[in-house]
Image (tube, rainbow, N blue to C red):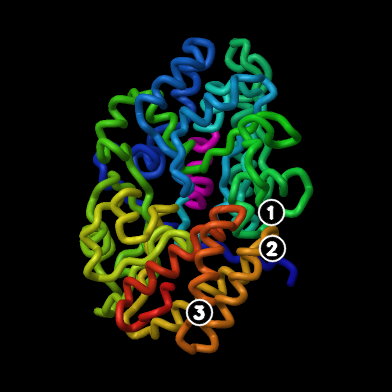
Amino acid sequence: MAGRVPPRSPPIPATAITGDPVVLAGIVAGEAAWRTWVETVGRRSPEHVRSEVAASGLRGRGGAGFPVAAKWAAAGGSPETVVIANGDEGDPGSYADRLLMEADPARVLEGLALACFACGARRGLVLVRSEYPQALAAMRDAVARARADGHLGRQVHGSDVDLDVEVVAGAGSYVTGEETALIAGLEGGRGCARARPPYPTSQGLWDAPTVVNNVETLAAVPWIVSRGGDAYARRGTPGETGTKLVCLSERFARPGCYEVELGVPVRWIVTELGGGLREGAELGVLQVGGPLGGFLSEEDLDVPLTEAGLAGYGAALGHAGLVAVERRLEPLDVLRHVWAFAAAESCGACSPCRVGSRRGLEQARAGAPPGDAYVRMLNVMGEASLCAFGRRLPHAVRSLARAYGDRLRGWGG
């Protein structure tokens, strides 16, 4: 219909609980982007940026949790290096990257520019999930403004730094958020995971050294370089420093994106920030970190929001989306949903995940108590799948069975 205005998503509520926000500095505190970049390029060295990020203890916020400075160092400082901002956010219940790309795209670009500077790279890419048209438009507009303002291009701000950034749309698959599958998609191939080694930092996009950092990870870099790595390391816990964006699903009384310090109790997030569930509904289980994360029972919620703490319950931090599952829902239906997601999103590159996810769904749909074959299938998926998608799914299934206890006995394998 002529003149029809396309629908727009409602704004995402965003709140920083940390006092001095890091990732949400622009969105909730109005802190202008690019100031740190202007102060850094031509005045400080790449070694300075790398040392501050190393001192901060910053780890990847996309789920893998790899130390950022170590990944940068592994690329070797070649000018042929490519740095990719991974905005292919696929976890159901997570929308932190979307918020950053739509509401503060300049901060994401500034973090990418600083990462390129630290790695000696002259080229950056921003990969935006194809289901995020507003984020794609916002990132492209931000790149155009950055070029016009002299933050990108040749001899940036009178220095000897050359840097350009391109924004591209993702392939629309969950698995393409994994770095080797992401690179395969950018090269025009199927978005399937690749065996490692070689690792992308030595042989990635078009065989060039490639660093892939999550959008939220990069958005923290300007604050770290400006305030210092030690200031960031004082937040969170000694083993897992800094802050994390946590997304609460629509069944919470106060859904939204919250910046919290790592180590706060999950129960505090659920009850104090989220206000519990809407309409007095009772929580059955809580999904943490998407389909590869895991599930907690109501009794487990005193666990700290850390990778180590969650691992003790068979769960993982992941992207830190919290999805509330009401008690009225049948546990077997929740399990079927997990297996259905796995079967739909498996890229098919390896047999353990491709076959296992389908057989898991068939078993759950049948509803019959699982036997030894089901247990063996979970073990094979967890040990032999090519990427984290297949390897983590058995952990998620087992954590769901553990969280439901007698209501789902036997389904954890």
Residue at 53% in and 11% down: 42
Query: Which image quadrant for residue 238?
Result: top left
Q: Is residue 322 left or right of residue 153?
A: left
How much space separates mark 2 and mark 1, taking CA atoms? Answer: 8 Å
Residue 282 visible? The answer is yes
Q: Is residue 319 magenta?
A: no
Characterize the magenta stretch by its predominant secondary structure.
helix
Quadrant position of the N terminus in the picture: bottom right
Residue 6 visible? The answer is no
Q: Position of residue 66 (x, y in %)?
A: 46, 39
176 and 160: which one is in front?
176
* Image vertical order of residue 285 relative to residue 329, above or below: above
Label located before the other in sequence (2 or 3): 3
Q: Which three-letter amino acid code belongs to the residue tagged 2?
A: Gly
Give the secondary structure at mark 1. Answer: loop
Q: Which three-letter amino acid code belongs to the residue tagged 1?
A: Cys
Q: Which three-letter amino acid code belongs to the residue tagged 3?
A: Arg
Query: Which image quadrant for residue 154?
Result: top right
Q: Is residue 287 left or right of residue 186?
A: left
Callout 2 touching callout 1 (CB < 8 Å): yes
Residue sticking out furthest to the front:
372
Q: Position of residue 189 (x, y in %)?
A: 77, 50
Residue at 29% in and 75% down: 283
The residue to which callout 2 is attached is: 348
The residue to which callout 3 is attached is: 336
Label located before the other in sequence (2 or 1): 1
* Image vertical order of residue 344 relative to residue 174, above or below: below
265 and 93: which one is in front?
265
Callout 2 touching callout 3 (CB < 8 Å): no
Q: Position of residue 241 (x, y in %)?
A: 31, 37
The residue to which callout 1 is attached is: 192
